[in-house]
Amino acid sequence: MDIQGKTVLLTGASGGIGQALARVLAAAGARLILSGRKHEPLNGIRQELPGEGHLAIAVDLSDERDRQQLITLAKDQNVEVLINNAGINQLSMHADMSPAEIASMIDINLTVPMILCSQLIPILLQRQAAMIINVGSIMGSIGMAGSASYCASKFGLRGFTESLRRELADSTVRVVYFAPRMTSTAINDDKMVAMNSALGTAMDQPAEVAQQLMSVIASHRRREHYIGWPEKLFVRLNSVLPGVVDRALRKQLPTVLSHATHH
């Protein structure tokens, strides 16, 4: 897709990946509707973007009234591309997570993208060319200790995206699942950063991730895109030889436990 002149709804626009995406999309000529939780950082991003006509709206996506406000704006602005980028994460052993924390993780990471898609697909179907990009994670293909709820939400998002892509296969709406690996953003708290450092986990910069997403948008055939090596290999191995991945990850378990367990 040629993104120039397209109207793009980007959720999670005030986060690390979101800000980087906003910059590269605007530089490529897209008109952006930026969604995030806080008005000030959103407005700051909007003001620094090249081009004209960008909008910023501060909403709590878990709140039905706020969410409907965003959907109405997107419809009024004739959105052509939906990028479901908003997400939350938490490093914690599953037994230590409260019911509210589990519900919030599933809500923001899975339910909200599903609702936005259902409400905006009728608008997208009216376009000559439209696109839905659901931003998942490598952990939507590999279950990791200390991230059970997050993995569940991203596994769900990957399955939803695959189903939706097949549902819309004969339409003008292209559906893509985009899976970054660990990225250096504020979604990772101090515990997560410390654990990744101890494990020697590679972390990408948001600008690198944004550039990869732009290449996916520009391509015409790509349905799923995974970032990073050896993470791509682990995704394939996990689907055919999960025992190999089990053994590799079990070696990391003491380190994960030391950072994820509540003290």
Image (tube, rainbow, N blue to C red):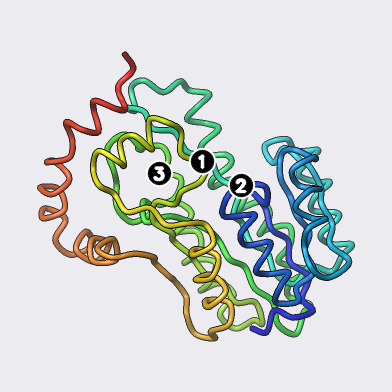
Distance from disc 2 to disc 3, alpha carbons, whole Å, reads 21 Å
> Gap in Å between the C-alphas at discs 1 and 2?
8 Å
Density class for disc 1 (Cα within 10 Å; few <14, some 14-19, many ≥20) is: some
The tag on residue 256 is none
Left or right: 167, with 2 as reference point: left
Labels 2 and 3 touching (C-beta < 8 A): no
Residue 25 at x, y percent in the picture: 68, 69
Along the line of sight, which residue is nearer the eye, 37 or 171? 37
Amino acid type indicated by mark 1: Ile
* Viewer-closest of 247 and 255: 255
For disc 2, the neighbor class at 10 Å (few under 14, some 14 to 19, many from 20) is: many
Indicate left or right for 22 with 92 as reference: right
Dot placed on the residue nearer the N-terminal end, 2 or 3: 2
Give the residue at mark 1: 187
Q: Specify which label sits upstream in the sequence, 1 or 3.
A: 3
Is label 2 in a helix, a strand or a loop? loop
Mark 1 or mark 2: name the one nearer the start of the chain: 2
**Which quadrant of the figure contains the N terminus?**
bottom right
Amino acid carrying label 3: it is Ala
> Hey, what amino acid is under mark 2?
Gly
Residue visible at 46% across and 33% down in the picture = 189
Tag of residue 152:
3
Residue 213: percent from the left, percent from the top?
53, 70
Which of the pair 256/242 is nearer the observer? 256
**Cα gap from disc 1 to disc 3, whole angstroms:** 17 Å
Q: Which residue is mark 2?
A: 15
Say if mark 1 contacts mark 2, CB within 8 Å. Answer: yes
